[in-house]
Amino acid sequence: MSSSNSVEGSYSKRCAACKHLRRRCAEDCVLAPYFPATHPERFECVHKIFGAGNVARMLKAIPVQERAQAADSLSAEAYRRVQDPVYGSTGIVIQTNQEISSTQCELAKIRAQISMYEAQMATEQQPPPPGLPQQQGSLGSQENMPMFEPNDPFNFLN
Amino acid sequence: MATSHNSSLLMASTSSNSCNSTITGTGSLSGSNTTSSPCAACKFLRRKCQPDCVFAPYFPPDNPTKFQNVHKVFGASNVTKLLNDLQPYQREDAVNSLAYEADMRLRDPVYGCVGVISVLQHELRQLQLDLLRARAELSRYEAAASAANLIGNTSPGLALHAGTGFGHEQFFHPQNGTHHHAMLRGLETGGVNGAYNDSGLAAAIGFGSLASGGLQFLKPSTAAGGEERPSQV
């Protein structure tokens, strides 16, 4: 009884990966810390897309302190691939790129409008050259432009 | 405007190195394995390339790296299962997206494609903040112009700009947001016109990111151990 209990005990401590693969979970199982038995669907997703062997190999090639992040990113990618078998995470990249492009376009348009306002304001705030009749704060208004007489171009000096 | 910009984006020919050679018309199902050399997959796996080889249309022999990367990350049998679950017209895009993700994972073993997404989303957030600030600034200018008009200041230039001269309504029309969602829904349901665009995938990925085999504004390798940890996506 005790031996079966110990066997059952060791089996109950298996990680999700070893449970799924129906194998003994070694103490140094590389997948155990990142695929606990409490979340079997996480490993199933990763196994379906990457394969347990590939995941274990990839995690082994990474420093221990970064393996948790790697397992999380692999899980996220696998989940997205299951949701979208054609594009997976790449679909998010495409979408985000498109959003960036459209936002940049809109920003450029608004900045162009702002520049025009700023240019106009700068022109309006410029004091008129001395001797010229003062304008009434308008720009491009024909009726306020000084009338240069071609026969007396220096009339304003009077 | 957004539609024409996106359609020109999809028509662009930039793509990643790993995706490049398969976009230019090698996706036909007639395959090249009957008389010519075996496909890259069968070459790598050292097996006879059958006439109905599922890999042959998507892994031409002149680009062995593409299959090697995919095999290293996903495994040939997993890729076979994935492709067999898809319709034939979906497979080229699926292979190209797998190749892209495999390439990203090999460049950045910790974050892979998720790191790229994180960088892009950060950039998008910054742009959206800039856009908000710019809109606020523009509103201030327009308010000032409107006030000047009300006071009776004769400034036909400002009056022109304040309301109608430069398509003001189209920039702030609420339909701009729904238009983007429609584009995204179209992408989710299969492309711009409701059908998968074989040539669009690598171009859309490559825009601003993978052109010339580089990452113009994406640096996934810096995401690993960089100053910002990507959020879980």
Image (spheres, coloured by chain):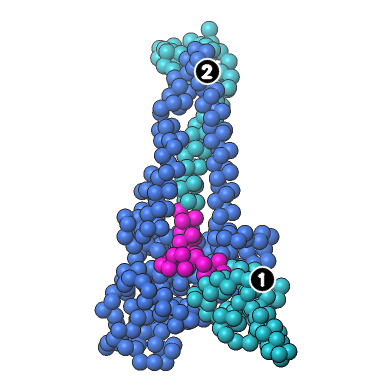
Chain colours: A cyan, B blue
Name the residue located 66 percent from the left edge and 71 percent from the top edge: A68
State the CA–CA distance, disc 1 to disc 2: 61 Å
Quadrant of the drawing holding the C terminus of chain B: bottom right
Chain of residue at mark 2: B
Does any portion of residue A123 appear in the rendered image?
Answer: no
Residue linked to disc 1 = A68
Residue A144 image point, x, y percent: 46, 13
Q: Which quadrant of the view contains residue B160?
A: top left
Question: Which residue ends up furthest to the front in the rendered image?
Answer: A1
Residue linked to disc 2 = B148
**The residue tagged with tag 2: helix, strand or loop?**
helix
Give the residues drawn in magenta, as a range: A74-98
Residue A85: within the magenta? yes
In the picture, the disc for residue A36 is: none
Q: Nearer the viewer, mark 1 or mark 2?
A: 1
The correct choice, above or below, for A152 with respect to A122 in the image is above
The answer to whether B216 appears left or right of B86 in the picture is right
